[in-house]
Image (cartoon, helix red, strand yellow):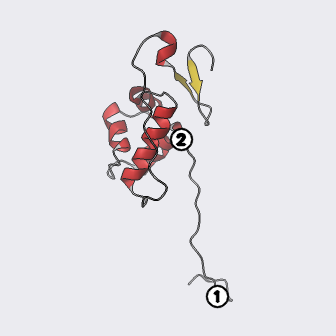
Amino acid sequence: MRGGEIVNESNKAYRDPMATGKGRKVKPTPMPSDNEIFTAKVFGQAIRSGRTHQNISLVDAAKDIGVHKDTMTRIEQGDAKVSLGNFLSAMEIAGFTLKIVPLEIKVDEDGQWF
């Protein structure tokens, strides 16, 4: 941290509202349970948790990904009508990465999936 900035895992700097005495403190929210079925709502809750644990305000996160704060709110609520690109940008700000893990894949002797 330097000069009131917070740098998250993706090396993006954010203004720390507490460093300047301006703004409100961001209250951390809990991560959804690992046992929950993955839905857009759970995805949004995870994004909010990551953002708030880094003390990044909703407004600052929205500015960084180039959306209105209302869109950022919709992302964190899991609104499935929000573009996947905006969800992925918010995920990056929250300090998460996405890993594609294949389900068990069955391949025949010719290399064809079935």
Q: Position of residue 63 (x, y in %)?
A: 43, 28
Q: Residue at x 43, y 50 (%)?
A: 43
Amino acid carrying label 1: it is Asp
Q: Residue at x 56, y 15 (%)?
A: 4
**What residue is shown with label 1?**
108
**What residue is shown with label 2?**
92
Indicate which disc residue 95 carries.
none
Examine the image and state in which quarter residue 10 appears: top right
Q: Quadrant of the C terminus?
A: bottom right
The first of marks 2 and 1 along the sequence is 2
Q: Is residue 104 above or below residue 99?
A: below
Q: Is residue 19 above or below residue 79?
A: above
Amino acid carrying label 2: it is Glu
Residue 108 left/right relative to 89: right
Most extreme residue toward the top, as rendered? 21
Residue 81 left/right relative to 3: left
User: Which one is nearer the viewer's eye here, 28 or 72?
Assistant: 28
Number of numbered discs visible in the structure rendering: 2
Q: Is residue 36 above or below residue 13?
A: below
Q: Residue at x 62, y 83 (%)?
A: 112
Examine the image and state in which quarter residue 1 appears: top right
